[in-house]
C-alpha cells in the first residue's frame, strides 16, 4: 500500500487538565523535573480505606471554561473534557468555522462515564430513601456524554465517537480520528480522553482487584519497573489533541507540533485483566503500529510505556519491547509518566500521546521516578528519576486495557 496516497495527519494543539498541572507548560515542566502530581485523596474520607492516595486534579475552576449555571452538577469527567478541549483549540489557534463545523470531529476516550455522578445519585436514593432523581441522571452517566457536551459547548457538528476501551480508550480515540483524517473523511478532529473516578466505590473496586498499590506514601507509591512495585495509583484528568490534515493545517499558517504516522488496535483474547504471558499480545500491537507507519523498529528512539507499576504489566511489556525491537531495545529511552500522574485509566492513552508529542518537539524523555531498585526482569533504559535528552524522529505510545485491548501509536517529529 502506497502511504503517499493518503493524507498526512498533523498534531497542531494540546489541551491538558492533569494531576501534574493545567495547561501544557505546567504539565510538561512538572514531568521533566520529575515532580509528582500524586497526593492524599481529598474527595472523600479515607479513614476506613486501605488506599488513601490518588492523582487528583488541583486548582480547577469550572467557571473558567463553562457558564456557572450550565456546569452545575456535571460529572468531573465532562468538565475536564470541556476544559481540555477549549485549551487544545486555543493552542492550535483554531476556530471551529475554519473548516466548517461538520468537517471537524470529536472523538473521546472514556472508561467509566459519569461514575462519580451515578455514585452520588445512588447515595441519595438509598440514604434518603427517595425515588426522586435528577432528570439528568441518565444522560450524565452515559460515557458518550463527554463528547455530547463538548460538541454543544464548542460548536462541533462533525462525527462524534466515544471509545470505551478501558485503559486504551484515549489512545483508541486518537487512532480512530487519525484514520478518518488520513482517509479524507474529515479535515480535523478534537481527539483525546477524559476520566474522573476517584470515588469511594470505584477506588474500593480497584483495590478489591488488587490493582492498586498498598503504599500510601504519595511520593513513592507509583514505581513502574521497580522491583518493589506493587500496583498502580489511580489518577484523573483530561487531554485533547487537535489533529488536522497536514496540508490544510499548513495552508492556514499553523506550525504542527508533530505528526501521527501509525496506529494499531488489537485484542489479545486472553483474560479480562491479566496481559498475555511474555507480552505476546503487546508485541503484536507494537508490530502492527510500526507496519502502519511504514518504518523499521530501529527508527524509534523513545517509547512512552503503558508502565502501570503492576507486577505483570511491567514484566511483560519489557518482554514485548524486546520481542519487537530486539537488540535495538537497549538503545531506546522508555519512560512511564504514570509514576508522576498515576494511572488515568480511560484518559491515560491521550496523556501519554501528548507526552510523546512534547518529547519529540523538545527532544527530551521525561523520567520514570521512584525507579530505585532495579528489577532483573525489567532491564531496559527506563530513564530512572532524571530526564534524558534524545535524538530521534519517531516515538511510540503504548496503551493496554482491561479486556485485552491493546493500542499503539507512532508519532513523528515535524520537520
Image (cartoon, grey):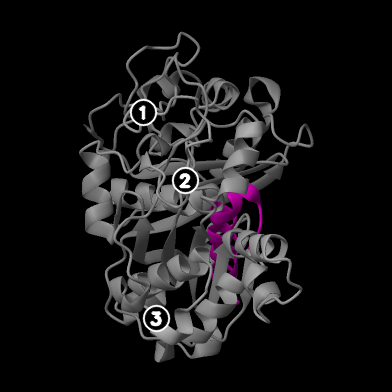
Q: Residues within 10 Å of mark 2 (few under 14, many from 20)?
A: few
- Looking at the image, is mark 2 or mark 1 earlier in the sequence? 2
- Which structural element holds mark 2? loop
Which numbered disc, 2 or 3, marks the residue that appears first in the sequence? 2
- Residue under label 3, please give it: 66
Q: CA distance from mark 2 to mark 3?
A: 28 Å
In space, the residues marked 2 and 1 are separated at their CA atoms by: 17 Å
The spot of residue 367 in percent (x, y) is 29, 32
Locate residue 101, reporting x and y percent: 50, 89
User: Of helix, strand and loop, which mostly describes the magenta segment?
Assistant: helix
Q: On the rendered image, what quadrant is the N terminus found in?
A: bottom right
Label 1, on which residue? 217
Q: Is residue 347 above or below residue 399?
A: below
Please tell me which of labels 1 and 3 falls first in the chain. Answer: 3
Judging from the image, what secondary structure is the residue with disc 3 in?
A: loop
Q: Are marks 1 and 3 in contact (CB under 8 Å)?
A: no
Task: Label 1, secondary structure: give it.
Answer: loop
Label 2–label 1 contact, CB within 8 A: no
Q: CA distance from mark 1 to mark 3?
A: 35 Å
Decide: is 408 above or below 1: above
Residue 184 magenta: yes
Q: Residue furthest top?
A: 376
Residue pointed to by mark 2: 45
Tell which tag, 1 or 3, sits nearer the viewer. Answer: 1
Bounds of the magenta segment: 163-186
Q: Residue at x 48, y 40 (%)?
A: 46
Residue 223 part of the magenta-drawn span: no
Q: Quadrant of residue 158?
A: bottom right
Amino acid at each position: 500500500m502506497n502511504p503517499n496516497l493518503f493524507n498526512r495527519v498533523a498534531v497542531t494543539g494540546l489541551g491538558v487538565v492533569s494531576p501534574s498541572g493545567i495547561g501544557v507548560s505546567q504539565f510538561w515542566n512538572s514531568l521533566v523535573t520529575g515532580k509528582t502530581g500524586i497526593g492524599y485523596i481529598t474527595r472523600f474520607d479515607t479513614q476506613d480505606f486501605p488506599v488513601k492516595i490518588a492523582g487528583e486534579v488541583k486548582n480547577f475552576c469550572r467557571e473558567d471554561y463553562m457558564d456557572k449555571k450550565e456546569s452545575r452538577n456535571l460529572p468531573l469527567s465532562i468538565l475536564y473534557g470541556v476544559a481540555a478541549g477549549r485549551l487544545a483549540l486555543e493552542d492550535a489557534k483554531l476556530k471551529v468555522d475554519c473548516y466548517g463545523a461538520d468537517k471537524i470531529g470529536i472523538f473521546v476516550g472514556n472508561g467509566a462515564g459519569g461514575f462519580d455522578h451515578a455514585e452520588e445519585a445512588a447515595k441519595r436514593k438509598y440514604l434518603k430513601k427517595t425515588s426522586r432523581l435528577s432528570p439528568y441522571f441518565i444522560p450524565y452517566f452515559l460515557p458518550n456524554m463527554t463528547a455530547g457536551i463538548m460538541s454543544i459547548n464548542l460548536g462541533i457538528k462533525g462525527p462524534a465517537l466515544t471509545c470505551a476501551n478501558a485503559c486504551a480508550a484515549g489512545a483508541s480515540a486518537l487512532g480512530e480520528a487519525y484514520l478518518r483524517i488520513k482517509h479524507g473523511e474529515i479535515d480535523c478532529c478534537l481527539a483525546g480522553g477524559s476520566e474522573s473516578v476517584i470515588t469511594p466505590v470505584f477506588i474500593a473496586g480497584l483495590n478489591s482487584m488488587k490493582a492498586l498499590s498498598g503504599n500510601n506514601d504519595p511520593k513513592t507509591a507509583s514505581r513502574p519497573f521497580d522491583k518493589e512495585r506493587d500496583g498502580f495509583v489511580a489518577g484523573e484528568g483530561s487531554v485533547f489533541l487537535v489533529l488536522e490534515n497536514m496540508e490544510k493545517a499548513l495552508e492556514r499558517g499553523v506550525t504542527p507540533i508533530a505528526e501521527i504516522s501509525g496506529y494499531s488496535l488489537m485484542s489479545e483474547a486472553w483474560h479480562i485483566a491479566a496481559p498475555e504471558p511474555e507480552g505476546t499480545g503487546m508485541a503484536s500491537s507494537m508490530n502492527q503500529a510500526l507496519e502502519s507507519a511504514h518504518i523499521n523498529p530501529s527508527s524509534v528512539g523513545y517509547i512512552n510505556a503503558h508502565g502501570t507499576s503492576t507486577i505483570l504489566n511491567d514484566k511483560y511489556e519489557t518482554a514485548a519491547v524486546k520481542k519487537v525491537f530486539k537488540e535495538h531495545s537497549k538503545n531506546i529511552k522508555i519512560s512511564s509518566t504514570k509514576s508522576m500522574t498515576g494511572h488515568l485509566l480511560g484518559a491515560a492513552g491521550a496523556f501519554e500521546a501528548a507526552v510523546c508529542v512534547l518529547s519529540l518537539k523538545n527532544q527530551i524523555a521525561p523520567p520514570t521516578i521512584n525507579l530505585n531498585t532495579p528489577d532483573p526482569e525489567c532491564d531496559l533504559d527506563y530513564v530512572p528519576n532524571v530526564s534524558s535528552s534524545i535524538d530521534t524522529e519517531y516515538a511510540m505510545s503504548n496503551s493496554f486495557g482491561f479486556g485485552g485491548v491493546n493500542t499503539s501509536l507512532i508519532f513523528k517529529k515535524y520537520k
